[in-house]
Amino acid sequence: MYQYILKRVLLTIPTLLGAAALVFLLMRLIPGDICLVRLGSGGASFDPKALIACHKEIGVDRPILVQFLEFIWGIIRFDFGTSMWSGKPVSTEILARLPISVEIALLATTVAVGIAIPLGTISALKQNTWIDVAVRIFAIGGIATPSFWLGIVSVLLVLDITSWVSGTPWMPPIDYVPIWKDPIRNLSMAILPAITVGYRYAAVSMRMTRSAMLEVMREDYVRTARAKGLINKLIINRHALKNALLPVVTLIGIEFAFLIGGLVVTEQVFNLNGVGRLFVQAVQNQDYTLTQALVMLTVAVFVFTNLAVDLLYGWLDPRIHFA
Amino acid sequence: MRAWLLTTGLCAAMALGAVWPADAQAPKRGGTLNYMIAADGGPSLDGHKETTYAVLHATAPFYSNLIRVNPENPSSTTDFICDLCTEMPVPTDGGLTFAFKIRGGVQFHDGTPLDAHDVAVSWRRIIFPPEGVSSAREAAYPMVDKIEDPDDRTVIFRLKFPTLSFMPALADPWSFIYSRKVLEKDQHFYERNIMGSGPFKLTSYEIGQAIHGERNPAYYQSGQPYLDGFNGIFAPKQQTRVDAIRADRAALEFRGMSPSARDQLVKELGDQVSVQESDWNCGNVFTPNHKKKPFDDVRVRKALFMAVDQWHGAEALRKIAIVRTVGGLVFPGSPFAATRDELIHFPGYGTDIENARAEARRLLKEAGAEGLTVEMLNRNVDQPYIIVGTWLVDEFRKIGVTVRQNIVPTGPWLEKMRAGDFDLAMEAYCQMVVNPIADSGRYLPHEIYKENFAYHDDPKQVEIYNRMVRETDPAKARVLMRAYENQVINVGAHQLPTLWFYRIVPMRAYVKGWKISNSHYLNQNLANIWLDQ
């Protein structure tokens, strides 16, 4: 198994380099100029000399090939340089945003798993009953409702309800405090986005759990277990659910990786200073170095999440061997 | 000059439509102000280098300036007072020399004393930036010849020519006074760090999230600041900012909100919210590209201007957008601004719109440009770019010109204009201290003012401007301004200034002391704010 892990880790190197080359080229194909955005976006006039100085300072006046080789050399040394927009190290920029994104991703996954697996299982076991119908409506609602809309509505609801109940409107804090500094403030900020994101995530996972369970429950080994006289609870927990979880785990892995950098709109709605928002800013500002680093981070998260999911397969299904 | 400043200051204060509640109470000490900065966070922290208000709203409370707009009368376009100097200088040498005496006993936040050398070094960094340092406002001081600091208490600005535009330029809110010793070690220190002599000291800065300051007990303005500290929270989305004021997570944001946001807050909070409003020194400009046919023909440009009914447009748009006042090249609150009677003779300002549009159609026919279909470049920002752009498109339709908006992000928008790759463009710009002569320089041809994208050529316009910039008699300068305006809007029909921005700042009613100004760049050091709680 260690050999398998090593092989997979080594395979990430060409994947990351390929992604690096692609994002480097794509960023430079987008029309615009970071220095123009920086000097001109405020609407104030600026000195043309400042534009030349800005190009020189951030190094975009050098040949593309030189910039590319420097970028690749930086990746090899795990040095992504400094943000062209802020002048701060890219690692500082990302690390400032990563905790809130990871926290929301973990909380949303907890919400999703906590809802999806029990409800998806019950829905499958109670197929075509009112319970099944109710769960399916709940799931369809989650898929059909955009997270950002749910986010806006949930904030307004909280404001209106608290205003009605106590006379003073309340909303979650709009500035992030780490959980180890003030857990209550932190959770009161994170819980609403986690629920709004987790609902959609749960809905997708719930449908996957249901269909996988329905399929597994029709398998010969489940029939055999029943014929042996095993109690239903044991059949479901030990035989059916574990096997049904294989596609669900894959889905959860993909969704989790997406949440790290993909919560763009939700982060805007809840004023979360996360990686998704940073990603949009970096692209809008045409901050090449930061965008490149964020793409590399996203690719790495996907690659390693998939590796973790693959390893989990082996635990869920002992027939799977890593060669 | 001082007499003129006083007179015009009084006139402007009376003329300007800014409104604010009277704060007759004595300021209270204590409390922490939570305010929002309507942005994702700025680039670097260096005020000399940056242009976005996101940087200024986050960093201004930490710094001092040489002079500033009077924080007790910030809507005035002519009322400047000393910040680090002891008194406003009387120019000598026929208006060529301005000698400032610097306060004693001022300290930087690290405890080192601030003297005239720090002031001179900071100003040299802005006007004559050393190699490897970019100054965004270098071009704003063509009149400055040199800056001298003969002793610890004196800074002298020597000008190349006398001009009325020097003193407003000197009150630039970005001109933070940095420590000479720090700059000598590292010219880029202030891009990453904050260390000034302003009313607040930095406690922490969370990138893209918030900036926190605490009271500077050694601040030189007696009794100020009143607050114990502040939290500036970056919140780019307007609905978040409205909700946050509603729930009192923050008391206000200083840039300005839309009319609908103001109405929502007033409706929901009643007397717990107060609103300050003012004309805003940000202009919208409609720019035809003179290098593109048929806009190389003055008749076509003039026809487009004539299609626009600014007076009725203002009435309608003020309800939904952050625009309000019809004006010419100069900020409407300035003594240099055109009056309504002076404006109505220009295309795009007439009061008989039907006649104007008939004349516009005639001009188009004469120029062989009937049934014109073109594209207008616009920036993907709702307030007010897209709203004003959409209104203009409809106005042009009324003379048979079909305009499609090409709405693009800021980067491509700026790049296309700089490359001349557009037919028509919707532009907007914000100035800081109202400086009519310097501000109107943006209408000069591209050869002179590189950020003018009409790509026109007009020696007569340049000649008038050069006379105006050297004129020291305000009355004569005003006459020249009218001639310059006539050349830009009427004779050459180079660009059409449309509605000026309108600044609306709703805030929790317990916030006192702050007075709205005509620019969101001004009056942001928070020293005079106090909380009535």
Image (cartoon, rainbow, N blue to C red):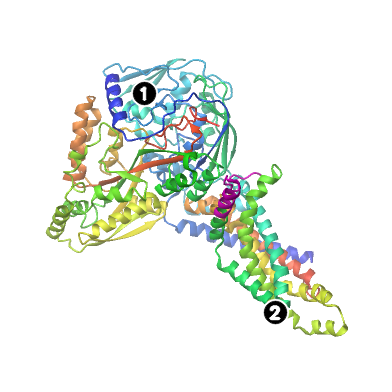
Contact flag, marks 2 and 1 (Cβ < 8 Å): no
User: Residue at left 52%, top 43%?
Assistant: B245
Kindly state the secondary structure of the residue where label 2 is placed. Answer: loop
Q: Amino acid at mark 1?
A: Lys
In the picture, the disc for residue B238 is none
> From the image, which quarter does the C terminus of chain B lie in?
top right
Spot occupied by residue B124 in the image (x, y as percentages of width and height): 42, 27
User: Which of the two marks, 2 or 1, is nearer to us in this view?
Assistant: 2
Foreground: B206 or A311?
B206
Report the magenta residues as a range.
A156-177
Q: For the residue carrying disc 2, how many other residues have a C-alpha within 10 Å: few (<14), some (14-19), or many (20+)?
A: some
Spot occupied by residue A316 in the image (x, y as percentages of width and height): 78, 70
* Residue A45 sits above or below residue A271 on the image: above
Is residue B423 in view?
A: no
User: Residue at left 20%, top 52%?
Assistant: B301
Specify the quadrant of the image occupied by residue B430.
Answer: top left
Spot occupied by residue A52 in the image (x, y as percentages of width and height): 41, 42
Q: Amino acid at mark 2?
A: Gln
Left or right position of A300 against B171: right
Q: Which residue is mark 1?
A: B146
Kindly state the secondary structure of the residue where label 1 is placed. Answer: strand
Chain where mark 2 sits: A
Q: For the residue carrying disc 1, how many other residues have a C-alpha within 10 Å: few (<14), some (14-19), or many (20+)?
A: some
* Residue A26 sits above or below residue A271 on the image: below
Q: Magenta segment: does it hold B128?
A: no
Q: Magenta segment: does it hold A159?
A: yes
Foreground: B445 or A193?
A193
Q: Which residue is mark 2?
A: A127
